[in-house]
């Protein structure tokens, strides 16, 4: 999921910045997803697209383009008020996000040796 070459380019091959980036992702991801789950469950899509947009940015910063693309589709579905698509895309986000989290933690573990 994470393109390590892109990620290293994003952080200019700086392991300290990479570590901080992964820790920030790990801290921010779960609360954003929880808000998205509540938003979609309540059907309040149009007014709460910021979280999908934030998730798109977080994935992009990590070089996780596949997850970023799913988040972009979710953002669009929410803006359009498409509840069935939003529900389906949230499921995809949860799978992709867990894969990104696992890979990001592996990268962090490698950095710490």
Image: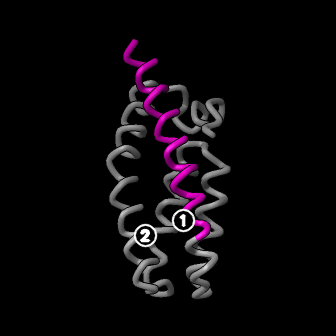
Q: CA distance from mark 1 to mark 2?
A: 8 Å
The x, y position of residue 83, in whole percent, is 57, 82
Q: Is residue 15 above or below residue 73?
A: above
Q: Which residue appears at 42% of the width and 26% of the height?
A: 108
Label 2: how many Cα within 10 Å (few below 14, some 14–19, many 20+): many
The image's colouring method is: one colour
The residue pinned by badge 2 equals 36
Camera-side residue: 81 or 28?
81
Establish if 28 lies above or below 6: below
Tag 1 and tag 2, C-beta contact below 8 Å: yes
Check if residue 101 falls in the magenta segment. yes
Density class for disc 1 (Cα within 10 Å; few <14, some 14-19, many ≥20) is many
Residue 76 sits in which quadrant?
bottom right
**Left or right placement of residue 31 versus residue 72 in this view:** left
Q: 67 or 18: nearer the eye?
A: 67
Q: Secondary structure at mark 2?
A: helix
Q: Is residue 100 magenta?
A: yes
Quarter of the figure with the N terminus: top right
Q: 46 and 21: which one is in front?
A: 46
Q: Which residues are magenta?
A: 88-113
Count of labels shown? 2
- Residue that carries the numbered disc 1 in the rendered image: 90
Q: The C terminus lies in which quarter of the figure?
A: top left
- What is the x, y in percent for residue 27? 32, 47
Q: Is residue 112 above or below residue 23?
A: above
Where does residue 19 sit, x and y in percent of width and height? 39, 31
5 left or right, relative to 17? right
Residue 96, x across and y down, in percent:
57, 49
Q: Secondary structure at mark 1?
A: helix
């Amino acid at each position: 999921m994470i393109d390590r070459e892109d990620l290293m380019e994003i952080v200019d091959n700086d392991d300290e910045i990479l570590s901080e980036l992964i820790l920030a992702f790990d801290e921010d991801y779960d609360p954003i997803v929880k808000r998205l789950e509540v938003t979609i469950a309540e059907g309040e899509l149009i007014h709460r697209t910021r979280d999908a947009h934030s998730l798109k940015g977080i994935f992009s910063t990590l070089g996780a383009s596949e997850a970023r693309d799913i988040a972009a589709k979710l953002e669009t579905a929410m803006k359009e008020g498409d509840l069935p698509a939003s529900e389906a895309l949230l499921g995809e986000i949860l799978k992709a996000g867990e894969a990104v989290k696992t890979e990001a933690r592996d990268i962090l573990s490698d950095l710490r040796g």
